[in-house]
Image (tube, coloured by chain):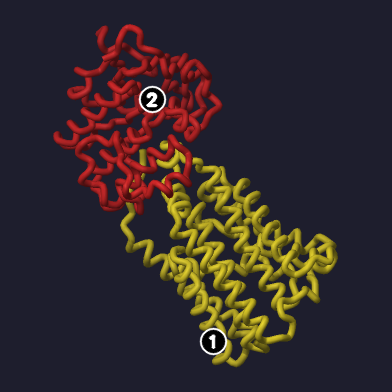
Amino acid sequence: MASNSAVPVLHAESLSRHFGPGAVLDRVSLCLLEGTLTLLTGRNGSGKTTLVNCLAGFDRSYSGRVYFGGESIDSAGPSKRARLGIVRTFQYPHLFDEFTVRDHLSLGRLASVPALSSYFQQQWQQTEIQSTPKGVEDLYARRGDELSFGEMKLVNTARAIATKPRVLLLDEPLASLDGERRAIVVNAILRIRDAGCSVLAVEHDLQDLLPIADAAFELTDGKMNDLRSK
Amino acid sequence: MVGFTAYVMQMAVGGALIALALSVYIDGIGYTVFHLIGISGFAAYAYTLLTLSGNWSVSAALAGGILVGAIAGWLCSECLRPLRGDGLTLASFGIGVGLFELLRFIPLTGGVFGIAGVPQFGVGEPIPTLIVTVVFLIVGAVVATFWRRSLGGAIVRSIRQDEWAALSIGARVEGHQRFTGAFAGALAAAGGIYSGATTGFIEPRDFQPTNLLIPLAATILACGKTPLGVLGSLFAIVFFFQAVRFIGQDPTTAGPVSEIIVAVLVAAILVIVRVRKQVMPHGQ
């Protein structure tokens, strides 16, 4: 749980994003603190994924400002933001067909240490991945195109965690997962939060995450409302 | 190596190098590759002008031509990088046609008549020409195979497969794509220079986008995958072409007919493979 002295890591200030005449995000402000879990919910089409896209740099057609560690990162693209430590996952898991799960996790770690040559020396297949959520190990040898949807979602989250992010943006991390795998992801979120990472989880089903969230918001009509004050 | 055999070998190896360039490009960037033949033409002209006007040695001009191809490949991939889908297809085709037209209208390149007397590898000596042919083929195949099997090649393929996933973990997507463009440009350049330097003559029409038929057909038949598959497909198509010409006796008719047969066969295979493959939804 967050302490009173938690440091702001990612700060969105008055973000607006329009698709056609309507505002999906209407001057939304959000501050993600170090070592906290923020839960974001809302109806389909309320702008949750759009907000994640804007924070991660996948959508930069917004007005407003995004600060990381106090510095504006509006001009940084998604790859640069990921290298800074702002890492996201997707509702639909994106994996590489010909890489094994172990490769994916190694690649995730590589992204934060951009040294291909040392990667060769480490012999990726034998690398230990310390931050891997428990329960993923039995998938290590399987390729991306051999996994079920639920397994892909699990690896998608594990790969993002393997980059050792400072801010982790999870887009519906629990959707389509069975009870056992939901528990794996929830435990992983707790572990990485306790390690100091700031986690923003977008989720419809609040049952698992609301009790452990440090802050919770609902996006309605482009506005952010505090769930806890309702 | 003389006469008809030399002609067939030159056609096969020149096409093979272009096909390898296509497979590298398709692997790493996308399916639209019409500009690569124009790049091979630019490199062939660069080699020719460096040797004839610049008095460079054949080997230095070969290196210079390949460098020109790599730079052109990098510049083209930089222009095409932001585009996707139909826009990418149109732009790639436009660059290919544009490069071809440039070669036709710039006085330095000899205009539509091209340039004769291109310094040849092993002029009139069968063994050196054969050696050069084999060396070009082996080096091209080995380099493309090594790249395909390397970690770098796997990463570049994965980026093409899913750019968003690569971006989300901080991959330097733009750098990888630029490198792939330059690498494919260098391979295409080797193909263009090889063709010019073994026939001793180049003209713009050798480098028009429609001349991609054979390399493109070979790459499609091999599913753009293993370099050895690409080479095998290309040699099979060239053999088929020449067999049709030989059997047809009238090359003027048999040539285009064989091209039509190859185009129809490849299109049919492509459609059948596409239809039979399961299409997965991939939305957000």
Q: Chain of mark 1?
A: B
Q: Where is residue A39? Give x, y as percent.
A: 29, 20
Q: Colour of chain A?
A: red
Q: Amino acid at mark 2?
A: Val
What crowding class fits label 1: few (fewer than 14 Cα within 10 Å), some (14-19), or many (20 or more)? many
Identify the image quadrant of the C terminus of chain B.
top left
Note whether residue A213 is visible: yes
Identify the image quadrant of the N terminus of chain B.
bottom right
Q: Is residue A191 left or right of residue B57?
A: left
Q: Colour of chain B?
A: yellow
Q: Give the mark toward the camera: 2 or 1.
A: 2
Residue where numbered disc 2 is placed: A167
Q: Where is residue B216? Give x, y as percent.
A: 53, 67
Q: Amino acid at mark 1?
A: Val
Residue situated in front as seen by the camera: B272 or B175: B175
| Residue displayed at 47% across by 14% down | A13
| Residue displayed at 46% across by 32% down | A83
Q: Is residue A167 left or right of residue A3?
A: right
Task: Specify the label residue B34 is tagged with.
Answer: none
Q: CA distance from mark 2 to mark 1?
A: 64 Å
Q: Where is residue A202? Give x, y as percent.
A: 31, 26
Q: Quadrant of residue A208?
A: top left
Above or below B253: residue A38 = above
Residue where numbered disc 1 is placed: B244
Q: Secondary structure at mark 1?
A: helix
Above or below B269: residue B129 = below
Q: Where is residue B196? Give x, y as percent.
A: 71, 72
Residue situated in front as seen by the camera: B142 or B252: B142
What crowding class fits label 2: few (fewer than 14 Cα within 10 Å), some (14-19), or many (20 or more)? many
| Residue displayed at 18% across by 23% down | A207
